[in-house]
Amino acid sequence: MPVPAALTRTSTDTHCPYCALQCGMEVRTAEAGVSVAPREFPTNRGGMCQKGWTSATLLTSAGRVTTPLLREHRDAPLRPVSWDTALDHVASRLAELREQHGADSVGVFGGGGLTNEKAYQLGKFARVALGTSQVDYNGRFCMSSAAAAGIKAFGMDRGMPFPVSDVAQADAVLLIGANVAETMPPFMRHVLPAARSGGLIVIDPRRTPTAEQASLHLQPAPGTDLALALGMLHAVVADGHLDHRYLADRTSGFDQVWRIAAAWWPERVERVTGVAAADQRAAVRLLARARNAYVLTARGTEQHASGVATVSAWINLCLALGLPGRPGSGYGCLTGQGNGQGGREHGQKADQLPGYRKIDDPAARAHVAGVWGVDPDSLPGPGRSAYELLDALGTGTGPRALLVFGSNLVVSAPRAGHVAARLDALELLVVADFVLSETAAAADVVFPVTQWAEEDGTMTSLEGRVLLRQRALSAPHGVRSDLELLQGLAIRLGQPAQRFQTEAEEVFEELRRASAGGIADYSGISYDRLRAGEALHWPVPGVDHPGTPRAFLDRFAHPDGLARFQPVDHTGPAEPPDAEFPLYATTGRVLQHYQSGAQTRRVPELLAAQPEAFVEVHPDTARRAGVHDGQWAAVTSRRGQVLARVRCLPSMRLDTVFLPFHFPGSERANLITNPALDPTSRMPEFKVCAVRLAPADAEALPA
Amino acid sequence: MTPRRVAIIGYGMAGARLADQIRRHDPTGRQVSVTMVGAEPHPGYNRILLSNVVAGSMGIEDVLLHQRDWAERNAVDLRLGVSAIGLDTGSRQVRLTGGSTVDYDDLVLATGSTPWIPPVQGLLDDRGSLAEGVVAFRDLNDCRQILDSAPVGTPVAVIGGGLLGLEAARGLTGRGNPVTVVHQVGHLMERQLDPQAGAVLARVLRDTGIEFRLGRTAAKYSVGKGLELDDGSTVEAGLVVVSAGTRPASELASAAGLDVERGVLIDDELRTSDPHVRAIGDCARHPGTVSGLVQPAWEQAAVLADLLTGAEPSSRYLGTQVVTRLKTRGIDLATMGEVHVDTDCTDAEVVRLEDPARGRYAKIVLRDDLVTGAIVLGSPDAAATITQLHDRGIPAPTDRMALLLGRALPSGVESAGVEADPAALPASTLICRCNTVDKGRLVTAWRSGARSVEDLVTATRASTGCGGCKAAVGSLCEWLTDQTPTPAENPRSWAAT
C-alpha cells in the first residue's frame, strides 16, 4: 500500500548554495525527489534566481562523483577505489614528500564557498597536520583588494558593515563594477527604490542589465576607475559638497588626499576615463543631496593590479561625503562567493589565523595554538599568496603536492593555461569535489564530498551575518564530508582523531574559542542561537551580546576611532592596449552560471540558457576585426587565446570586449587574463588586459 | 655616489610637477638633489583652479599644490620669495635676488609666462605697473586683488574673450558681478572655435548674464569712468581684468645667450641650446605643442624626470595633442585638433549639428575614419567619447550622427518590455532575466492553463528574482485575458508574434 505523500514529505529551511546573498530557501524532499523554493528572508525578500531554483538538480545529478578515484600514474585513467585505499595512498605520499623535501613541499588550496567550519578546519589541517605554510584560497581572486582597503580605512573588513535591507531606505545608491542584476538578482529588490526615485548610479564599462536600470550610467574605460574616483572627489570639493564636520570629527588624512585629487579636475579625468565631467559632477550631486546614500563596490573595480588603491579611492570619496558609519548610509563591498566573507576570516589565507588574526602576531599564534593544543612555535609563518603559490607548483622551490578544496583552478585562475601546466608538474594533485570539475579530472586522486543540503555548516553572508545551513537529506552512498576527509588524512598523518572533529557543530564550538578576542569574533554565536533564528552579525563577543548589525556608528576600528583617508593616485592598467593588442578585454559573469561553471554547467536548464562562451563587441569594432555576429572569434592576449561566439552590441565601448569566464577548455576566458598582482592584496588583474580580435580558425573551434 | 644637482627655477605647475615626478622615482634624494626656486612667498598652486577661487567655491589653501611641510618631507631645498636674476652657463651657477647662488649639474627653467598687456591708454601707471583698478588674471595675488577690489555688484570689464578670459568672466558673474567681455575678434575663442560655434557659445554665456562687445578694441581706461572702446562707447567698470594672452618668461635664458624665439627653444629631451639647461612648461617652445595649457607641461615634466633620474633614459617628449575645455559651471565645451575646416571641404569629412537655441553645437572633422578635429558644445557625453577617439586614434563608429548626438540618441532596444505594448513584442523578448523567461514561454504557459498572474509566475518563475518585471508580467496577463474568450475563433490575434 502506498504511503501518503504528506507523511514522507519534509521541508528544511536553509540557504541557496551559490552566491554571498545566501537567499533563504526551503529544501523539500518527497518521494518524487528533491525540490527547492524561495522563502522570505531579509537578503532576498522571497526572491530567487534561476540558479537557486535549479540548485536541487545537482544533488541527484548523474555528473556526481560518488566514489574516490585514483590514477596509478600520470598517464593512467582515474579508477574507482575505496576510501581507505585513497586515504592511505594520499597520506603516505604526503608523509613521504614531507620527509624528503620538508613540510612546505605540500600545498593546500581552499575556496570561498566552503563553510566556516571547513575553512577553519582546512587552515588548521595545513598548519598542524601538514605543518605547511603553503595554504591559500581562491578568495585572493575575489575579495582581497576590498578587504585590504577596508582594513586600511576602517581598521576592520566586514564587506557590508550594515544589513542589506538598509539599502532599500536610501535615496541614492552608487554601484561600482557590480552587475548585481545578474550576479545576485534578488539584491535588485533593495536597489529598486533608489532606481525608481532617480538615484541609482552604476559605474561599469559595459551597459550591463544593472546599468540598464540606472538613472545615471558612467561607462569608464577598463582600468581607469581610480582616476574616476579622484575626479569625483575633486567635484565633491569644487562643488561645495565636502562634509567638513564629519571630516573633523571622524577622519584623518584628508589634506594629503586632496593634494592628489586637486590635480584630477573632472575635465582631466574625462580624458583618461571617457566619462563626461558633467556626469562625474551629476553623480556626486545625487550622492551629496540624498538624505541617505550607499556606495557599493564589487569585483569590477577590485580585480586590478591597483585594486587596493582603487577601492581606497572610492572609500575616500565616501568619507568626503560623510557616509560611512552614519545610520542609513555607508560604504560596502559586495562579497561574491557564498562564504566569501567567512572564508577569509578563519585561517585558510596564507597570512591569517582564525578570527581574522595575523599569523605573524605572537599573541595571535599563542592564542590559537592554545586552542589547538600545540606549541605556538610549531605553527608555520605566512606562505605564498594564491597566484604565487600556483605559479611555484612543481618548480623545485614550490610545493610538489597540492590538495584542492572547493575550487576549480584550471578554469578560474588567471593565466589559466600556465596554471594548468603548473598543476601538471606536480607529483601529486588531490581534489575534493562533488562533481568531476576540470581540475578534478586532472587530479591523481579525487575525493567525492557532500553538498550543501547534505551537511550542516555555517556561512557568513555579504552582510556579515552568520547563517546556519542545516542538513536536509542524506548524502549518496560513498560520499563523505570534507570534515571526515580531513580527519581521515589527519589520523593517517599521526594526529589524534579528536583534534579533527567531523561534526560541524563541534568544529564550530572550537572555532568560537579560536576566534574569541579576534576582529571577527564569533565566540558569542552558537548553533542554538542560529537555530532560534537570531540575526547575528559579527562581532558577537559574548553569548549575551546581540551581535553588530551596524558597525562603526560610534567609532571606526582603528585605535583612535577615526577612519583614515588613504593617499592614492591613478597609474592605469598593467597592460595598456598597443598596436599589436589594440583592445581592452574585461571578464565577468552571466546570470545562469556560477564561478567556473563546474556546478551550473551540469544543470541542463542553465546550460541550455547559456551554453557557450561569447564575446561582446561593438558592431564597428567587430566589422574592423572581420568578425560577424554569431560567428566564432579568437580573442588573443600575450598569454593565450580564447574562443568565443561573437555578440555584437551597440552599447559596448569601441575599445573594449567582454567575455564571461564560466566556460572550460578553449573557451576559458582566463587563458588570456593578466596575473599582474596588486602589491598589497596579491589580487590578479582579471578585469583588464590588452587583446586582439580575429576570426577563429575553423579547425580550432570547440566541438 | 654624489647626487646629481638639479635646480628648478619656478615653483609653478610645471616645476612642482617635475619635483614630484623626480621624488616618485627617487624618494630619498639619493640619485638627485633638488633645489627649487619660487618667486612667490607661498607654495605653488594649481592655476587651473583659480577660477574656483574667484567664484568662491574654493579657498586659497585648497588650491596649493603641496602641503606646507612638503619640501622638508621630500628632501627638497626650497627657496621661496626669491627670483633668479642671473645665469652663468659656463660655471653652472644661478644668481638669486638677495645675493645667494645655486650651483647645478642640470638647470631646469620652469619660469612660466607673464600676462601680455595690450597697449591701451590707462592700463599701466607711470612706472609701467598695472594701474589702480586693473588686474591681470594670472596668479594667486591677482585672485586676491579681484576679490578685494570688486565686491559683489561691482561692474567688471574683461579684456579678452579667450579661454581664460571667459573663465574669469563666468567666475565673476557666478559671484554676482555684472561682467562685460571686450574681444577684438568677431567671435569668441577664435583659435579653438569656428564662427558658428563662437556665436552659440556667446549666446549661452549671455544667458548667464555676461555682456559682449565683439570685434571691438579697448581704447582708454580711466578710474571712475570705465573703459572706452574704439567705437566711442563706454563700458562701465569698477575693475578691469586683462586676459589678452601671455608671453613666455624667457628673459633669464635670453640674457644667458640661450636660443629663444617666442619661448626657450627645446628638443625632445627638453634640452635648450645649452646641454645642461632644460626648459619645460609655458616658458619653453617645442615644435610639437602650443603653450598656455597644463597638459603639455605635465607631460614634459614626466619625461624630464625619467631622464634626470635615469629611470627611463629613452624617454622622449614628442608633443601633445591638446584638448581645450572651458571649465565653467553649466557650460560644457571641448575643442581639439583642426576645427577651421568646413562641411564643403573635399579632402576631409565634416559632420555638423547645430541647435543654437538650446546651446548645442557639435562638429567633427574626420580623415580616414579618424577624428582629427572637433568642437562639442552642450553635449558632455558626446564630447567625452569624441575626445577619447581623438586622443587614442580609435576609428570613429560608422554612425557619425549617433556619435554627435551622444546620449540624446533614442535607444533602439528597450531593456525589458515593461513600458512596451505586450502585443507588439516578439516572442523571444526576455521578460524575466533572472529566470530566463521570454514572452513565448509566458504565452505557452497561458495556453497550458495558467490564467492568472499568480499561475503564470508559478508555471514560469517569472518575476521571482529581482521582481523588476512584475509589471510586465501583469500587463502581459491582461493582454492575454483581453484576447480570450475567443482564441478558437481568431487564433492569430493572440499568437506570439
Image: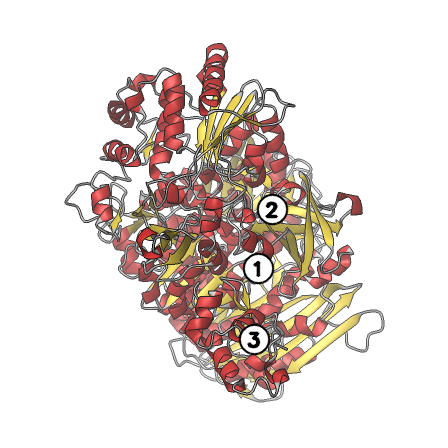
Residue count near mark 1 (Cα–Cα under 10 Å), binned few <14, some 14–19, many ≥20 = many
Residue B484 vs A272, above or below: the answer is below
Question: Mark 3 and mark 1: span between their CA atoms?
Answer: 46 Å
At a point 57% along the width and 54% down the height, the residue shown is B112
Which residue, given by chain and number where applicable, does mark 1 sit on? A206
- Is A27 situated left or right of B376 in this image? left
The three-letter amino acid code for the residue at tag 1 is Arg
Percent across and percent down for residue A624 are: 77, 58
Labelled pair 3, 2 in contact (Cβ < 8 Å): no
Labelled pair 3, 1 in contact (Cβ < 8 Å): no
A631 or B65, nearer to the observer: A631
Disc 1, SS: loop
The three-letter amino acid code for the residue at tag 2 is Phe
B411 or B82, nearer to the observer: B411
- Discs 3 and 2 share one subunit: no
Residue B451 vs A508, above or below: the answer is below
Disc 3, SS: strand
- Discs 1 and 2 share one subunit: yes
Which residue, given by chain and number where applicable, does mark 2 sit on? A663
Q: Chain of mark 1?
A: A
The three-letter amino acid code for the residue at tag 3 is Ile
A404 or B248, nearer to the observer: A404
Question: Mark 1 and mark 2: span between their CA atoms?
Answer: 20 Å
Which residue, given by chain and number where applicable, does mark 3 sit on? B159
Percent across and percent down for residue A157 are: 34, 44
Residue count near mark 3 (Cα–Cα under 10 Å), binned few <14, some 14–19, many ≥20 = many
Residue A109 vs A569, above or below: the answer is above
Percent across and percent down for residue A521 are: 25, 39
- Discs 3 and 1 share one subunit: no
* Quadrant into which the C terminus of chain A falls: top right
